[in-house]
Amino acid sequence: MSTKKSFILYHDYRQHLELLSDEEKGKLLMALFDYSEAGILPNFNGMLKMAFSFIKAQIDRDAAKYAAVCEKNRENIQRRWKKEDAEA
C-alpha cells in the first residue's frame, strides 16, 4: 500500500473485538498487517469479515490523511527551496 511502517489500532475497537475468539483475533491481526503492508485482502466470512471491514476503512482513511500531510509537506519544502534559490 505505502511506505508507512505502521497503522493505528483504536481503543474503540475493543468492544467489537471482544466478541471474537482469541483465534479469530489472531487471524484478524495478521490480516490487518498483510493489508497495511501489501494491500492483501483476506477471505473472511461472518464476524471476521465485519471486523476487518470497519478497521480496513479506518486504515484507508488514516493512510489518505497521512498521504495528504506528506504531499503538503513536500509542497512546502519545494516552495522554501525555490525561495532560497531566488534569494541567492
Image (cartoon, rainbow, N blue to C red):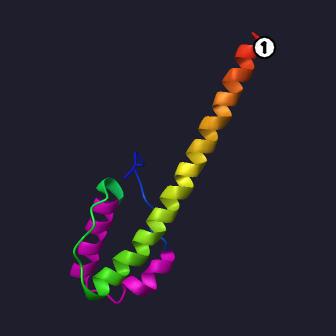
Which image quadrant for residue 6? bottom left
Task: Where is residue 29? Give x, y as percent.
Answer: 30, 69
Q: Is residue 4 above or below residue 42?
A: above
The residue lying furthest to the top in this view is 88
13 magenta-colored:
yes
Location of residue 27 with respect to 33 vertically, above or below: below
Residue 59 is left or right of residue 42, and the answer is right
Quadrant, the C terminus = top right
Q: Is residue 18 above or below residue 64?
A: below
Residue nearest the observer in this picture, 18 or 42 = 42
- At 53% across and 50% down in the image, what residue appears? 67
Q: Amino acid at mark 1?
A: Glu
Asked whether residue 74 is drawn in magenta, I would say no
Residue 78 percent location from the top left of the image: 64, 29
Pick whichever, 78 or 5, lies toward us: 78
Residue placed at 37% from the left, 53% from the top? 1
Q: Secondary structure at mark 1?
A: helix
Residue at the image position 35 percent from the left and 83 percent from the top: 50
Q: Residue 72: x, y in percent?
A: 63, 43
Task: Determine whether, in the image, residue 74 is placed left or right of residue 21.
Answer: right
The residues colored magenta run 11-35
Which residue is at 60% across, 36% downward? 74
Q: Residues within 10 Å of mark 1 (few under 14, many from 20)?
A: few
Q: Quadrant of residue 87?
A: top right
